[in-house]
Image: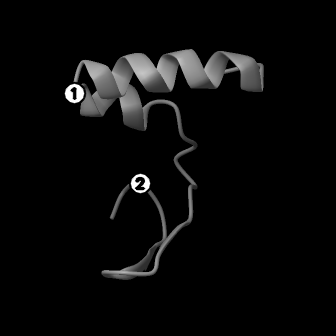
Amino acid sequence: MKEIEEFFPSYKEAVWQKDAAALLSLYSKELVAFDMWDQGFFGSLKE
């Protein structure tokens, strides 16, 4: 993904279609996500 403007339509379509693979493909494999309600954080998409 080259431009941030490309992210949002792709995100919307992936969520609308309930396509988890397409949604995850929008993120870097080195993603670090913080979750305040459950696990705390995820170190990468591999976890």
Residue 19, position as x, y percentages in the image: 25, 25
Q: Residue at x 54, y 16 (%)?
A: 9
Residue 36, position as x, y percentages in the image: 45, 81
The residue under label 1 is 18
Spatial separation of the CA atoms under disc 2 and disc 1 = 18 Å
Disc count in the image?
A: 2
The amino acid type, in three-letter code, at marker 1 is: Lys
- Looking at the image, residue 35 lies above or below residue 7: below
The residue under label 2 is 45
Residue 28, position as x, y percentages in the image: 58, 43
- Looking at the image, residue 17 lies above or below residue 44: above
Q: Residue at x 54, y 40 (%)?
A: 27
- Looking at the image, residue 23 lies above or below residue 30: above
2 or 1: mark nearer the eye:
1
For mark 2, does the 10 Å Cα neighbourhood hold few (<14), some (14 to 19), or many (20 or more) residues?
some
Residue 6 falls in image quadrant: top right
Q: Which mark is residue 8?
A: none
Residue 17, position as x, y percentages in the image: 24, 18
State which quarter of the image contains the C terminus: bottom left
Q: Earlier in the sequence, mark 2 or mark 1?
A: 1
Asked if disc 2 and disc 1 are in contact, CB closer than 8 Å, the reply is: no
Residue 1 falls in image quadrant: top right
Q: How is the image coloured?
A: one colour
